[in-house]
Each structure stands twice: as structure tokens, then as C-alpha cells.
Amino acid sequence: MGSLFRSEEMALCQLFLQSEAAYACVSELGELGLVQFRDLNPDVNAFQRKFVNEVRRCDEMERKLRYLEKEINKDGIPMLDTGESPEAPQPREMIDLEATFEKLENELREVNQNAEALKRNFLELTELKHILRKTQVFFDEQEGGVNQTTESMTRALITDEARTAGASMGPVQLGFVAGVILRERLPAFERMLWRACRGNVFLRQAMIETPLEDPTNGDQVHKSVFIIFFQGDQLKTRVKKICEGFRATLYPCPEAPADRREMAMGVMTRIEDLNTVLGQTQDHRHRVLVAAAKNLKNWFVKVRKIKAIYHTLNLFNLDVTQKCLIAECWVPLLDFEIIQLALRRGTERSGSSVPPILNRMQTFENPPTYNRTNKFTKAFQALIDAYGVASYREMNPAPYTIITFPFLFAVMFGDLGHGAIMALFGLWMIRKEKGLAAQKTDNEIWNIFFGGRYIIFLMGVFSMYTGLIYNDIFSKSLNIFGSHWQMSYNKSTVMENKYLQLSPKEDYEGSPYPFGMDPIWQVAGSNKIIFHNAYKMKISIIFGVTHMIFGVVMSWHNHTYFRNRISMIYEFIPQLAFLLLLFFYMVLLMFIKWIKFAATNEKPYSEACAPSILITFIDMVLFNTPKPAPEGCELYMFWGQHFVQVLFVVLAVGCIPIMLLAKPMLIMQARKLANEEVQPIAGASSDAEVGGVSNGGPNGGGGPHEEEEEMSEIFIHQSIHTIEYVLGSVSHTASYLRLWALSLAHAQLAEVLWTMVLSIGLKQEGWFGGVILTCVFAFWAILTVGILVLMEGLSAFLHTLRLHWVEFQSKFYKGQGYAFQPFSFDAIIENGSAATEAE
């Protein structure tokens, strides 16, 4: 119970472990997750610690596992995840794991290299096949009688002198090269050939219809076949350099048709053989990866546990005999025996005969804050820790926040329909939490929703309750019990008077509605907003003052626990009195007004005589004389009200100097008594006495001046605290009016959506009206969920968070502690990095 309302009691312990048993003992503590180790070697470089070689070996094993994981994901092979966490392997098992990972990596790299070489060879043969097939069309055109093109091409490539000389020597033969190039490079390649060769080449190209696979990265690329005709060795050299510059692949292409056909047949045969070998290689690779995928998750867990253990052992110190490791750690006192049992199990596993020693140490350091949580309270504790981790043994607001947070949210979000949507969404996440948690998605927004699933469910349930109180479901009333207002006018009177209102004297039955608000207010005219404003404004102040008083009472528990009598008498009592005498009195006036004044009463307690609470409170604080009451009405709500109000204001103002000066002056008086000078010893030299006083202390540090600075800091701190509390009491009370403002805005937005969207579809008739209503309802539902549930819900959530952080927790919660971060395998595996957690 103490752990729920305050953080766990912690103890600083010294742990002595035999070197042979240290690994197994730390492994057991990691499974337990209840020990936070301190670094006893803060000045030692990470590369100079004892177990740095083991950590490097774990880093190398993690690298190999990540390589295997990348290859498994590349092939889309599912990895087996049983959800179980294997124990940390023994140190001697590291060698077996390293050998297994080394074998798998080498085998996989060899298979990948062979597959890449085969794919590259297959690509070359495929490109050669396309070259032989496409260029055959070019040569068939020449040999099939289409000589005009060939003759014009020859005339274009041969000069007049060469043509005259060739007439006597016979026909001139043109050279050619054939190859493959990426399709997007072809236009630039063609322009470069034309410019570099000055138009003395002839290029023919044809696209390869099917994309080809790049053996390096597996991407699909589109290529084209080209053949370039030229004359002379000089142009041949130039053309080849251009092809090399554009990374075009050149292939041999025989001139004779028979040679081309023979080469094509050989290429097809080799492609078939390569397909067979490639299939066998892929099957072998798949089998290796499937076998690795079955154990990959467990291997990751084992390696991360080993690495975390050695990181933790690097925090320890070695004794002079080099046979014992010494550690310091924070442990919860309630779990002291459990930790000792874990250490004994680790010693037995290691086979050591020397038992571990766990000694509790005395320390003046502030222990870490550890609040034990479960899956329900974890989200609420996270809200508190986001403001600041509680100081050690400080009152924990989380248990009270479980109730107050969803309730204050619901006051702003009160709607039965919207609350039901939110509650059902939270309930769905709670029912499916195991499956949803196993997915481990990286979507940050979804993780926030899923982490707060219990908060969402409670906010929805509380919103349904306040929706019933407001009698509001999608801006309409339920009208379960019927209205307690009965109209006394006839129909013609109602139709002719647009702003006609019901009279509380004549039309109200006199008994309140059984549960919540009367449904008549949902169809009220101009006074609907006035009534809701008056009601919600007052309950906002009532809830706010009650919440702040509860926060001040919580500070009393802190002062009592820490035995801070001065703060309890001279801080808590004046603060509580100031809040009660002014603001709680204002709340009492609201209840007096509700009880004493009614429309059915005769003067002086009729509705017309009801005073304004706000004006009364302002007159009270400013000592103003109230304005004369209407005829027949009394000026005050009860006898002696003026005297009581003056007395309350005087007492409240008198609390301010007590809060401001009492505590610092008492501290100063106590220090003076504690630092009272000792009477001089008889026979002591006057020089020594004078010297001692002039030095201001034994070390000559000017003690009185330093004490004066400390007291000035105390006075300044107390002044700031007092001013903040006094002014904050006013501003915080006004801040709770956001409960009224957001509730009114939410109700009005829901009414606008109903009136301007859904009612359009409801007014349509016939089958066409059904179609229109379906479309309009879909649009209305999207706007309702998107605007009123998500956006308005987020707005109300943030305002509720502010009310707890600023208005409530500032009364008692310092939040100056630091979180307890135990050495836990579960946290390390969840974060995915052992090094981050250990450091």
C-alpha cells in the first residue's frame, strides 16, 4: 500500500561476487529486473575496461545477425517468434554461437556471390540473345533485297574520293559494333555519336521489350540493342570509347548468317543450363535462410543478454586479489530477499562454493524513485512522470489521477454518444491487447493510443456518465422519464410567440428530474444557453476548489511523513486557511443560493431577489458596501454575512505574512542557536581569538557571509512561493472555468453538426431521400468522429492534463527526483539495444 501512494523504499547495497559466479549472478538479476547498478569506474575509458573484448565479440555477432535478418527480409521469409525469452547462455556457449553465425554468414555470402556471378552471366547471355535476334533483322533487310537503304547508307559514309578509288578496287566493306545500353541513356548516346564522329556513323537501335534484372541490386532495368556501322579503324576506336563512356556493353556479332545462327543456338543452350543452376542456387539459399529464420529471434535475445551482462560487469570494480568483483546498486527493500535468492541461484548455476555478499550501506544520496505499476496503472503513472519524476518517497498523485483525470475530462467532453464511441474504442484495444502488442509497430501515434488504452476507456465511460447527467446524446436528449415542465399555454399562443418561455412558477411541477437535466432544456429557446452557462460555470468552480483543497491536503501528508513541522504549521495551515476562507466560502454561497432562493418562493427569498455570487465575492474582497437590494428583498443571504465576510478576508490576508516570513525567520533563529559561539578558553591568547574571528572560520572561508547568502536565498524562495500560491489561488480557480467553456463548445459543435448536416438528410422524403440520408449520415459520422471525438477529445485531454500538472500538483508535488532504471533484460530486449540500456 505504501508503494501505491509513495515510491518504494530503496537501499544502497554493496555486492561482492566471485569472478567465476559474477556472470551467472548478474544474469539472474537481469531476469529479475529489480537492481540498478552504479558505475564504479566513471573515469575509465570504455575501451580500457575488463570485459571490452567480450562486448566487441557480441557486437560482431549482432552484426552477423543483422546481416542474416536483412537477407531473410529480402526474401520475405517469416521469422518464428514464440514470444518466449531464452535464458542468457553461459560464457562457454559464446564460442558455439560465434561458430554458428560465422558458418551461416560465410555460407550465405558464398551463395550470394555465386548467385550474383550466375545472374551476371545470365544477363550477358540474355543481352547477347537479344543482340543476335535484333541484328538479324538488320542484316536480313540488307540480304533480302532492300539495297536502296544499304546503298544510300554506304554513299553517306563514303567520301567522293573513296568512292572513285573503290570503283576500281571493288565494293567497300563497312565495320560495325553491336551492344546493349540503358534505354534512358540512348538519346544522349546518339547525340554524342553524331557530334564526335561528325555524322560518319550509322546507328540502328531496337528496344528490348522485357525488363532485365540487375545482378547487383536486383532492380528491373530497361535496355535497348544498338548496332553502329562505320568505316575505318579511327572511327572504330572513337565509337568504342564513346560506348565505354556511356557504359554500354559490347558483344561480338558474326557477319555470316550461319555463324550467327550457330552462336544463337549455343547461347540458348547455355541459358537453359544457367536457369537450372540458378534455380538450384536459389533453393539452397532459401533453405539456409528458412533454417536461420526459425532461430533468429532467439539468437538476438541471447546475444543481447550476453552483451548486457558484460556491459554491467564493466561497471564493477576488481579487488586486489583479482578474484572478486565489487558492485554498488540500488535495490527496493521489499525485494531484498528475492534478490538474495536470485544471487544464490546464480552461484549454484556457476558451481561456485563462495556465496555472494549483499551488504546494505549508509548514504546521504537521494535514492531513485521507483513506483511499482501494472498494465492498468502504468499509463497514469506515465502522465505524472511526464511532468517530473517524484522526489524520493513523495506523495504519488497517480492513484488519485485514476479517478480525477477521466472525471474532469468527462466534464468537458460530456456526451453519451461520443463517450460511447471512445469507450468502445478503448475496450476493443483492451480485448485485443495481446495481439496488438505482439505486432510491435513503429507508428508513434498508434503506440500512444495503445499505451493509453485504459485511460481512453475510462474517459469514455466517465463521458457517458456526464452525458447522462447533461442528458445529451449527439446534441439530443434521451427523455426517459418525461419532462417535469408542463406547458400551460395553448398551441396558437406558442406558435404566435417565438420567444415564449415557460414559467417556473406555473409550468414546473416542483420536483427535480430523477437523473440529470430535464430534457426540456434541449428544446429551450434563448434561455437554454443561459441556464447551461450558469449551471456549468458553478460546477466548474465547485470541482476546481475541491480539487485544489485536496492538493493542499496532500501537502500535509508530505510534511507529516518527512517530519517537517515548520512547513506543516507555517505553510500548510495558512495555505489551507487562505483557500477555505475565500474560495471555499464562495462555493458555500453557491449552495446557499441554490437551496434558499427559488422561483416559487415569496420575497425576500424569491428568484428575483437572488444575489450574484461573483458580485458578492468581489464586494467581499474589496470591502465594498453592497448595492441596495430590490424592494422586498434582503441585502444578505444569511444573518451576520457582512461580519463573517470581513472576518474571513482579514484572516485570509493575515495568512500571507505568516506564509511569507514565519518559516525563514524560524530557520534563521534555529541556525543562530546551532551556531552559537563557544565561550573562550581561559588562558588563550587574544591574538588567536582575534585571528579566529577575522578569518570567519577554521578554513578562512568567510562563514558568516556564506550563511547570510543562504538565508537570503531562503527568503527569496519563500517570497516566490508565497506570491505564487496567493496569486495562483485566484488564477487557478479561474483556470477551472475551462471545464465550463469546453463543455459548452463541445455541446454547441455537436448541435451545429446535427442542425447543419444530419437534419438536411432527415428532411428528405421518398426513396431519393433515403439515398441522400445515407450520404449525409456518412458525412456526419466522419465529421463527428474526426472533429468531436478526435480533435475535441484531444483538446479536452490536454486541458485536463494542464489542470492536473499546474492547478493540482503544484500544491504538493515537487517532481525533482530521478527514475529507478533497473538492469532488466525485458527492457533491453524491448528497446532492441543492450548497449543503450547498460550505459
Image (cartoon, helix red, strand yellow):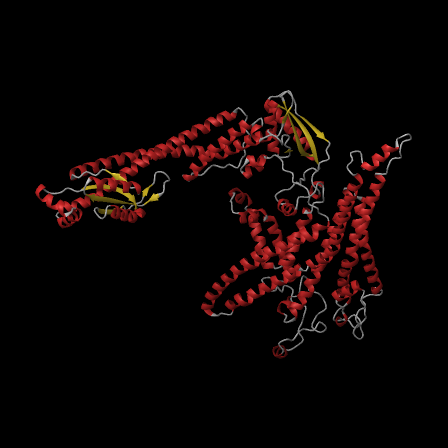
Query: Which of these two is toward me, 800 or 423?
Result: 800
Q: Hey, which residue is sitting farthest right in the picture? A: 682
Residue 174, horizontal then vertical, whole percent: 17, 42
The answer to whether one can see residue 438 in this image is: yes
Q: Residue at x 86, y 38 (%)?
A: 676
Q: Specify the quadrant that holds the N terminus.
A: top right
Query: Which of these two is toward me, 460 or 285?
Result: 285
Residue 551, horizontal then vertical, whole percent: 73, 51
Does 596 sit left or right of 320 as displayed?
right
Q: Hey, which residue is sitting farthest left in the picture? A: 168
The answer to whether 497 is drawn above or below residue 73 in the figure is below
Does 784 sit left or right of 339 as displayed?
left
Which quadrant of the structure image shows residue 85? top right
Query: Which of these two is toward me, 718 or 384?
Result: 718
* Count of number-bearing discs: 0
Residue 758, horizontal then vertical, whole percent: 53, 65
The answer to whether one can see residue 406 in this image is: no
Does 111 sit left or right of 326 as displayed?
left
